[in-house]
Image (cartoon, grey):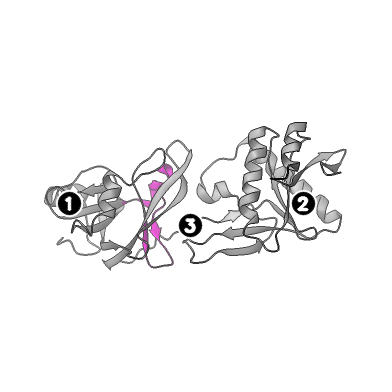
Amino acid sequence: MDIAVGTELKRREIHMRYGGSWQGGISPSGQTPHVMLFTDPSRGHQHGYFDGWGADGCYHYCGEGQRGDQEMTRGNLAIFDHIKKERSLHLFRSTTPGVVAHLGEFRLDPKRPWYTTDAPDTDGEIRSVIMFRLRPVDSASSDVELPFTPTASTVVEDVDAEQHNVEQMAINPSSKPRFADRREANLVRAYRRYLRSQGHTVGRKKIVPAGELKPLFTDLFDVTENLLIEAKGTVTREAVRMAIGQLFDYRRYIAPRPNIALLLPSQPRPDLIKLCHSDEVAAFAIWPEDEKYATSRD
């Protein structure tokens, strides 16, 4: 492709010269041996596309598909097969409406060409997306950087309990909190104050699993009791089951192995307490009662 790196031009001019679709982010050409990729980080977030440079030197480019889990078909397959099909990848970034800048030619990283992560779709539903790791052949520098980059090994850090990071915000920073989320946050703050009034050391854990893009944040970690706590704003079966799943996910990264508990806004019904106490789960519930807290293990 004879477009110099850094050149700005109208997108329609590119397609008139090299073919390919005038719409969409991935545009394989049927006329020339090129696959053209278009990114607009300033607007892509509304459709769950989080593109940008990572600390690993790759440009992380989200695959196509605005709803549901993305699959290795159509444009995504064109990227994946570009070396096999002897087609070059060229990346363009939107600068103004209808105008793009050529960031250069790229190739899929041979060691780890792609991975999957969670991101919201156009309707705000969380789904699995494909992230391609593009190594520059020749490229212009970019000020668009990813907030997170996949790590080579798992990282577990203690963070301040007052930090408001949650998994949903890590996935979709523009998402609006629901009533249950606000109720959950208030529940966490109140129980944190209570634990500290009892002389407990309380914090949180930030967990970045190896190869993952987004960090996981626990709700509370009672250091004094080595107790991992997950809060939910409702006492529905769905909420209890989700909390148990999250606790199991977090616990496998923490040493020494902590006990687990669910912080809920009220006493759960008997069958859900039995679920928590079952041998497979081995957890207990905590809820506010008479300005103090009751637990199902009492």
Q: Nearer the viewer, mark 1 or mark 3?
A: 3
Tell me the quarter of the image containing the N terminus.
Answer: bottom left
Q: Nearer the viewer, mark 3 or mark 2?
A: 3
Determine the image quadrant of residue 177. top right
Which is nearer the N-term, disc 3 or disc 2? Answer: 2
Q: Amino acid at mark 1?
A: Ile
Instruction: Give how far apart the Cα atoms at labels 1 and 3 are.
Output: 32 Å
Where residue 32 appears, as percent x and y from the top left, is 13, 53
Which residue in the protein does label 2 denote?
Answer: 192
Q: Amino acid at mark 2?
A: Arg
Classify mark 2: residues with Cα within 10 Å, few (<14), some (14-19) or many (20+): many
Residue drawn 77% across and 46% down? 190
Which is nearer the N-term, disc 1 or disc 2? Answer: 1
Read off the magenta span: 39-60
- Considering depth in this image, is 222 or 191 the residue closer to the camera? 222
Secondary-structure class at tag 2? helix
Q: Is residue 23 left or right of residue 31?
A: right
Q: Amino acid at mark 3?
A: Leu
Instruction: Give how far apart the Cα atoms at labels 3 and 2 are.
Output: 29 Å
Q: Is residue 139 left or right of residue 269?
A: left
Secondary-structure class at tag 1? helix
In the image, which disc is placed on residue 213?
Answer: 3
Asked if 224 appears above or below 248 in the picture, the reply is below
Residue drawn 65% across and 49% down? 247
Where residue 195 appears, as percent x and y from the top left, is 81, 53
Which residue in the protein does label 1 denote?
Answer: 14
Determine the image quadrant of residue 163. bottom right
